[in-house]
Image: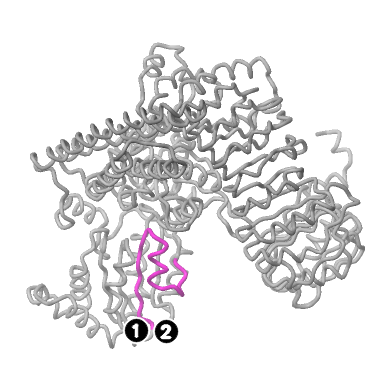
């Protein structure tokens, strides 16, 4: 797996070349030929990537493994050289000691010469000892054949242990049996081991399918796809004469095979199953063989990639196969192994660990079937369900590893990175993408920003079913992702094997002989992740020289944040101070939730830092001025630093800053005094106080902003802000908050120029809303607070053509009556009415809100009932109420909900209506609780 290490170094060499080019422009002398040598090293390693892609995934003999290991070590040596040079160059720039720069560049050139010489030696040994990359035809034929056996490619083979997914079967049967010209392709998508092939077999052998189609064929495509083999396999299934003409079929050119298959199928209603398709080119090579003259003919394909399914038929709706429920998982385990009553609780714990993956349940069931029926042995299995256990089960390891081996090198790095996060954690996508960018995984691709590349890579991993979507925003964007435990174990296994990462759990302090010997072992891992909050961290010193990333995950923060232990904080801070002295080459330092009171001045020596996460730390007072030395910093996260009162005026020195995150509820640190005019790369500034920086023209220089939130704006200053941001072509989200109730927002017609603005939040009085065509043209979400809107304003809002979410917050509308007119809010999915204290009567005319799905009514104390017009909606799924009277909720549940004509929305409440009802009937219960 040296491919990942080499890829990272190639990107760093590209970064170094850019830096040297910039130095040449700024007339910093460097020895002749140094840039050329750096370029040669980059090209040499990039050339090796082609061989390594196969050699890494298909290491079939010891010589290949040794050669790959040598290349990986050379990549690490090159990385060490680059990082050390860039660190020293930055430090000398700081100390105005540029006279030493030529000397360091001379040393750089000498060391590059030595590395190039080693590369030539390694390449020579590869030739001398016959180490070669195998051709696609003869790579791992044995393992591929074993995979074919495991996959049971015969559609008629009965699988002994299956769970009937009735809902899935019913839905897919309706698509397969539909007699219509469209929906020619039906797809089943899911991660490896989820049961796609098993479900396809159930459909293939279903009585309705057998009776419906005149002929059927099943072919296992696999990653090692050969077009000729697939065409011949289909012909043998659908044409009896072809079974007796195997020799003749072998001699036919591929295009004649296509024509023959097309001719055989032309007048038949057929069904062909293409099991396990990996690439879009597979479909492109086969689709011309499938005629569509006979109504109702179908292609059923299974794939791990969403994009493959959509490529085969863009009009279809691929079926994403779900994991099993806990009860379904338990039933499957019971089919595989007898579970005595006394072991049922242990068995259910084992089921939870398998996370609904059928293949894992079958493998673990097989393991349990060979164990004694004792709680000791089954508990041991439970405690050791990890990749180290499962990799002994070759079947599951090989099937999941196929997906990994298929990833491009940059995606492999992104996937391995997920192993750094604690098991079961919902990973914030914004944070993850910023970390990927900071690590330098992502190649520059045209004019696309690194964040854009990262987002595309995230979607590709989702499309390949390597990660799962967690929470989704109100506008349909992925907010969190998670990774199945088995795939996380795969990332850990591969990552540790390649020194990509190492995880430290609790109790790593040298309190015992065993832990001491373990903690003293040096590590070559590039990324260290600490999943604990109260350790002694001395053991980390042994990996300082090799480490490029250090991430702390303090998951106990929310449990003890209310207990401020100042003495403990001081000790914690002292235990961490060595990081700033020892880890000189860090690119990422994530201290989220680690309780430190202050940062030492030595933080400024970490000049290679790209990401500094200080969220939810106990930082007090001020940050050290030396923080301004971090000129390479891309992300500075100071959110929820509740005791931090002021930020020193050093942010302007961080000229590469892309994301400045400052928000803390109720008492954010003072930020209006900051100088910001140098931050031309800034993309995210979601919270900052208004100040002189706006008048000085700093905002005008932030033309790359995608997210902006300015608070404490004066009425005079808001005009300047609106005039400036109208030229921001990349702005997606804007929040503006006025300083006092006397200030007013002017007509904000300027925002109509912000063609990419999707989210707008205005906090303060609005004199008059602009006409609908003067709003941002692609506005999806609008949030208003303290706006004091009048009736006529609602008529303008309901004509916004793309608005999907409207939040009328406290003071946004201070009128007793609220009316939504016919055909108003034609695209609105989500409506929230929050603390509209004067609202008494709300009416919704027929054909208004035709797409409304979710509604929140919060603290509208005078509102007596919901509008009658809501009861005719066909799309409403849920009504949530908070802080409403008991009478309102009782009327909603007992009178209003039964009167809905087409749908019955779910009702969610902040109070338990039944308990309240009991208290009303029997107040004495209050004293019995």
**Residue 369 visible to an observer of this rendering:** no
Callout 1: helix, strand or loop? loop
Q: Quadrant of the N terminus?
A: top left
Q: Which residue is mark 2?
A: 181
| C-alpha gap between disc 1 and disc 2 | 8 Å
In the displayed structure image, the side of residue 686 where residue 513 appears, left or right: left
- Residue 294 lies, in percent from the top left, at 34, 86
Closer to the camera in the image, 745 or 917: 745
Instruction: Identify the residue at image location x=46%, y=20%.
Output: 508
Range drawn in magenta: 296-318
Closer to the camera in the image, 708 or 561: 708
Q: Which residue is mark 1?
A: 292
Q: Which mark is residue 174?
A: none
**Image quadrant assignment for residue 660:** top right
Decide whether residue 312 is among the magenta residues.
Answer: yes
- Residue 196 lies, in percent from the top left, at 37, 59
- Residue 899 lies, in percent from the top left, at 77, 70
The reply to whether the C-beta atoms of the residues labelled 1 and 2 are less than 8 Å apart is yes
Q: Quadrant of the C terminus?
A: top right
**Residue 263 visible to an observer of this rendering:** yes
């Amino acid at each position: 797996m040296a491919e990942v290490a080499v890829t990272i170094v190639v990107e760093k060499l590209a970064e170094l070349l850019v830096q040297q080019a910039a130095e040449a422009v700024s007339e910093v002398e460097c020895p002749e030929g140094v840039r050329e040598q750096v370029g040669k090293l980059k090209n040499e390693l990039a050339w090796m990537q082609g061989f390594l892609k196969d050699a890494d995934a298909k290491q079939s003999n010891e010589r290949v493994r040794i050669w790959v290991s040598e290349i990986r070590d050379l990549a690490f040596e090159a990385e060490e050289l680059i990082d050390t040079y860039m660190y020293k160059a930055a430090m000398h720039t700081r100390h105005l000691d540029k006279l030493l720069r030529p000397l360091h560049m001379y040393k750089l050139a000498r060391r590059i010469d030595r590395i190039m010489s080693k590369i030539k030696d390694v390449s020579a040994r590869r030739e001398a000892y016959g180490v070669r990359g195998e051709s696609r035809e003869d790579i791992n034929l044995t393992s591929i054949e074993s995979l074919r056996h495991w996959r049971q490619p015969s559609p008629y083979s009965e699988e002994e242990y299956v769970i009937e997914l009735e809902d899935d079967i019913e839905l897919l049967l309706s698509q397969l049996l539909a007699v219509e010209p469209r929906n020619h392709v039906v797809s089943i998508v899911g991660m490896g081991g989820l049961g796609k092939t098993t479900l396809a077999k159930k459909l293939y052998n279903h009585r309705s399918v057998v009776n419906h189609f005149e002929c059927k064929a099943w072919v296992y495509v696999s990653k090692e796809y050969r077009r000729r083999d697939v065409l011949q396999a289909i012909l043998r299934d659908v044409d009896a004469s072809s079974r007796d003409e195997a020799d003749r079929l072998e001699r036919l050119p591929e295009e004649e095979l296509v024509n023959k298959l097309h001719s055989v199928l032309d007048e038949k209603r057929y069904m062909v199953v293409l099991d396990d398709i990996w690439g879009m080119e597979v479909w492109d090579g086969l689709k011309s063989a499938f005629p569509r003259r006979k109504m109702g003919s179908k292609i059923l394909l299974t794939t791990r990639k969403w994009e493959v399914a959509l490529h085969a038929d863009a009009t279809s709706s691929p079926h994403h196969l779900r994991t099993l429920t806990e009860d379904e998982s338990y039933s499957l385990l019971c089919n595989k192994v007898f579970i005595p009553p006394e072991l049922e609780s242990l068995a259910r714990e084992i089921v939870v660990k398998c996370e609904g993956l059928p293949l894992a349940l079958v493998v673990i069931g097989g393991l349990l079937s060979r164990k004694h029926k004792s709680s000791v042995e089954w508990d041991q299995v439970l405690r050791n369900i990890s990749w180290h256990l499962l990799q002994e089960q070759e079947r599951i390891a090989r099937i999941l590893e196929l997906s990994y081996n298929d990833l491009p090198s940059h995606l492999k790095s992104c996937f391995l990175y997920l192993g750094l996060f604690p098991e079961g954690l919902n990973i914030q996508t914004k944070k993850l993408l910023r970390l990927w960018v900071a690590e330098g995984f992502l190649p520059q691709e045209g004019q696309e920003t690194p964040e854009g590349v990262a987002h595309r890579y995230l979607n590709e991993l989702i499309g390949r079913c390597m990660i799962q979507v967690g929470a989704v925003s109100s506008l349909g964007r992925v907010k969190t992702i998670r990774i199945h435990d088995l795939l996380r174990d795969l990332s850990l296994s591969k990552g540790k094997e390649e020194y990509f990462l190492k995880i430290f759990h609790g109790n790593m302090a040298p309190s015992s002989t065993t832990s001491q010997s373990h903690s003293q072992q040096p590590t070559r891992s590039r990324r260290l992740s600490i999943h604990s909050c109260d350790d002694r961290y001395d053991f980390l010193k042994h990996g300082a020289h090799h480490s490029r990333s250090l991430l702390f995950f303090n998951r106990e923060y929310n449990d003890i944040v209310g207990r401020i232990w100042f003495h403990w904080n001081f000790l914690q801070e002292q235990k961490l101070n060595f990081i700033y002295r020892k880890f000189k080459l860090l690119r990422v330092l994530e201290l989220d939730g680690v309780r430190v009171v202050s940062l030492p001045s030595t933080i400024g020596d970490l000049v290679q830092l790209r990401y500094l996460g200080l969220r939810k730390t106990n930082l007090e007072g001020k940050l050290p001025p030396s923080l301004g030395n971090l000129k390479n910093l891309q992300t500075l996260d100071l959110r929820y630093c509740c005791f931090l009162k002021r930020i020193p005026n050093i942010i302007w020195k961080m000229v590469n800053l892309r994301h400045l995150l400052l928000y803390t509820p109720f008492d954010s640190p003072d930020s209006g005094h900051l100088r910001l005019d140098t931050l031309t790369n800034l993309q995210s500034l979601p919270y900052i106080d208004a100040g002189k920086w706006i008048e000085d023209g700093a905002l005008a220089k932030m033309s790359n902003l995608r997210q902006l939130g300015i608070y404490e704006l004066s009425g005079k200053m808001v005009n300047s802000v609106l005039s400036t941001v109208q030229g921001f072509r990349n702005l997606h989200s804007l929040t503006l908050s006025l300083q006092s109730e006397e200030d007013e927002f002017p007509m904000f017609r300027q925002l109509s120029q912000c063609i990419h603005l999707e989210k707008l939040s205005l906090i303060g009085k609005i004199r008059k809303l602009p006409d609908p065509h003067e709003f941002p043209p692609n506005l999806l979400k609008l949030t208003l607070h303290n706006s004091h809107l009048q009736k006529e304003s609602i008529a303008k809002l309901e004509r916004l053509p793309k608005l999907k979410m409207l939040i009328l917050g406290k003071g946004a509308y201070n009128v007793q009556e609220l009316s939504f007119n016919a055909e108003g809010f034609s695209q609105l999915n989500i409506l929230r009415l929050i603390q509209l204290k004067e609202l008494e009567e709300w009416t919704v005319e027929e054909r208004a809100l035709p797409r409304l799905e979710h509604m929140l009514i919060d603290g509208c104390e005078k509102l007596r009932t919901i509008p009658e017009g809501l009861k005719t909606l066909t799309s409403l799924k849920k009504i949530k109420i908070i802080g409403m009277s008991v009478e309102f909720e009782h009327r909603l549940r007992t009178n209003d909900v039964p009167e809905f004509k087409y749908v019955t929305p779910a009702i969610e409440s902040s109070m338990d209506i039944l308990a309240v009802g009991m208290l009303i009937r029997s107040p004495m219960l209050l004293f019995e609780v």
